[in-house]
Amino acid sequence: MTIETIPFSKLALTEGANPRRSIDAAAIEGLAASIKADGLLQNLVVRKDGRKFRIVSGERRWRALALLVERGDIGKDYPVPVEVRADLTEADALRLATVENIQREQLPPMDEAEAFALLLGQGARLEDVAAKAGVSVLTVKRRVALASLTDEVKALVRNGEISLAAAEALTLGSAEQQRAVIERLESGYRYDADDIRDWLTGEKPALSLAIFPLERYEGTTTSDLFADEDSTVFDDAEQFLRLQTEAVEALAAHHREAGAAFVDILTDSYAAWWQYREADAEQGETGGVVIHFKPSGRVEVRQGLARREVRPSVAEETADHPAAPKEKPEYTGAVIRMAAAHKSLAVMAGLLANPRKAREVAVVTMLNACDFTARARLDAHPALGYFAGEDGKPETYATVEGAALTVMEALDIAATLTSRYLSPDRGAWETLLRPQKEPLALYEAVTALDDAALDALHLLLTTLTFGQGNMDALDAGASLFNRVASDLGVSMRDHWCPDEAFLTRRRKDQLEAIAKETGAVTRLGALKDYNKTQLAAALARHFERCAADDKLIAADLKARANAWLPEAMRFGGLEVESGNVAEDVTEVEADIEADDAIGDGFPTPAVAEDVQPAHAA
């Protein structure tokens, strides 16, 4: 080994050759300070590339030197001790860089995974990689399995948003399942590695998994409340797997006939995707096909792949991931489902005989509907979210919020609030629907409630989810929502007064029509002298004063204003009316039309108290 010195300016990075993807800026700062004080204590390893010397190992030292050059602490001709390797292949360079990085400062797990996968993919032995990297063979096997994760999951692991244990469990899922977990993570779900592993390995034979014509299945299916393909399962799991196996074999035959370079069928929970790469069409490579047929029946197909140069012994030793289930279960899935069905029906019969216990289970199930493995999620009606961040909340919102606070106190949920599940502009009702306790702990809290408190909780949970079905369309028909409102005798006149939030969203001509319909024109005067904003504010003030029983406003105008209700605020024609409002409105409209035939109405002193109209220049 010969050490020589070359100017810093002749050194260059080898793009993509460093297995370390994460560079700690603070560590580089510290290294630069050390080099400035004591000099470079260890040489770099380089190889000649024309007039430049490409770095094989020592990128962190090069970055520290570059930082010192940038700051003017050293010159570009600073002498750097290097060992020049003239006979290094690309594989040798990668191996040296990997070993140097791991021995000097442990690589982040995902960087290790991809570096090990590259080495093994070029024909290295597990024992050799482990020995030269200074880690155990098991560590290499665990790390290299992570290289099969999707790019999205790898990025989350690098950023620390997914734990290493959870990432290992995710290797048991298809790309689609991994994306589903990411979506749940972004939605605020809590989970750990066991949750993910159980979810991925306990998948049921759902209709959505079938790749065979459904008419070939002769058994029965079971659907839950939602009855979609993801929640409808084949009762005869053996028949499903037989039909699915036949379909996989037919799919493989189709790809072989189509000229695929190879067709591999993988049948374990874990697929070692790191053993494949994209086929290089520009180099004339014909792509192969890999079919991952999981024990659950899920099928994932990837095309256009080429096999890496993995030793057969390595491929065999890394075929199973350490996180995958090792022992075959005592019972098959079909037997487990049969037993679960029998036991579930027995408990159902018991609940029918114990109404109190049934109510306890109902509220625990509703509160725990946000669990990671739950198919359904109990969401509050969007009407609550609509007003959550608003300053002017209606009294009805305060009623619901107060009930939620009372229930939270009874269940001791308030003490477990975290900002992860509740933003400052949300309410107690939303916190109540977040998974604040484990199911058993929640059950213990619910069973401790007396009958009145349990009934109040059940009532609240039912109430939080009920409202108009589609908030983006007028509900003018005979809907369940309108029927319930009618049976309750709900009248919006008791809960709502036309305000600026509503009126400013109306057109100027609509505001003028409202003024005439309610008789407000007799107080506001010539409507043409108002712009839209002023007219909306004047009408809002008029309605507010009428609702407050202002003594300066005539009784007939108060009655008209307090009786007026736009169509959007009616319950589809089912609303309970008080008095013959329609006849009263018709009579007053006739009076207004007669007044308008004479003039624009007559302004009163009250105009100045509301909003002074803007006159045209």
Image (spheres, grey):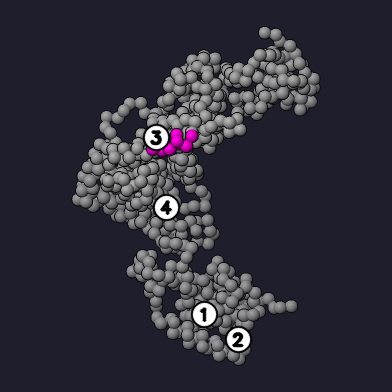
Query: In x, y percent, where is residue 585?
Result: 47, 83
| In the image, residue 128 lies in the stretch drawn in magenta | no
Real-space Cα separation, disc 1 to disc 3, in angstroms: 70 Å
Q: Which mark is residue 379?
A: 4
Real-space Cα separation, disc 4 to disc 3, in angstroms: 35 Å
Q: 427 or 73: nearer the eye?
A: 73
Kindly report which numbered mark, 1 or 3, lies closer to the viewer in this rendering.
3
| SS for callout 3 | strand
Q: Which residue is located at x 63 percent, y 27 percent?
A: 16
Mark 3 residue type? Phe
Q: Which mark is residue 518?
A: 1
Real-space Cα separation, disc 2 to disc 3, in angstroms: 81 Å
**Range of residues picked out in magenta:** 249-259
Mark 4 residue type? Asp
Query: In x, y percent, where is residue 340?
Result: 26, 40
The residue that mark 3 highlights is 293
Where's the C terminus, which quadrant?
bottom right
Real-space Cα separation, disc 1 to disc 2, in angstroms: 14 Å
Kindly report which numbered mark, 4 or 3, lies closer to the viewer in this rendering.
3
Query: In x, y percent, where is residue 464?
Result: 40, 56
Query: In x, y percent, where is residue 376?
Result: 38, 48
Q: Which residue is located at x 45 percent, y 22 percent?
A: 315
Mark 2 residue type? Gly
The residue that mark 2 highlights is 601
Residue 418 seen by the camera: no
Kindly report which numbered mark, 2 or 3, lies closer to the viewer in this rendering.
3
Q: Which residue is located at x 48 percent, y 43 percent?
A: 183
Residue 28 seen by the camera: yes
Real-space Cα separation, disc 4 to disc 1, in angstroms: 39 Å
